[in-house]
Image (cartoon, helix red, strand yellow):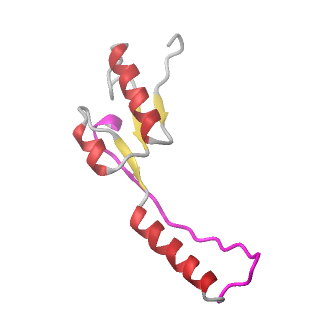
Amino acid sequence: MEEKVQAMLCTDFESTMLVYRLAYENEIKIPEELKLIGFLNEDYSRTLGPSVSYIEQFPEKIGRKGMQLLLKRMRGFSKKGTITEKKIHTELIHLESTKF
């Protein structure tokens, strides 16, 4: 708390909530004194006040691609021991916690 941090990018729900709570307990104003981005979903981020900006990861797309890869492997369409890389683009959703 001695060093003033201007922004936090949290990598999961728990760390986002921890930073949010620590800011509240130490009277650090979001977004005036601290910008906050988390890996949350829309339901959680919009219920907080101020709402938390988040990285939309599109879990349905991730699940669909993962299932397609698994089915290919199970049906013998991919070589054993090969690594397949698929990219799912994410999107930064700006809400109240990152307003300037």
Q: Identify the residue at the far right of this view.
A: 81
Q: Identify the residue at the far top of this view.
A: 2
For the C terminus, give its image quadrant: top left
Vertical relation: 100 (above or below) 64: above
- Foreground pick, 24 / 6: 24
- Residue 75 at x, y percent in the picture: 60, 88
- Residue 53 at x, y percent in the picture: 35, 42
Q: Is residue 59 visible?
A: yes
Residue at 33% of width from left, 35% of height from top? 97
Vertical relation: 59 (above or below) 18: below
- Foreground pick, 32 / 36: 36
Q: Main secondary structure of the magenta part?
A: loop
- Residue 3 at x, y percent in the picture: 54, 14
Q: Which residues are magenta?
A: 77-98
Residue at 33% of width from left, 14% of height from top? 27
Q: Identify the residue at the far front of this view.
A: 74
Give the quadrant of residue 98.
top left
Vertical relation: 44 (above or below) 29: below
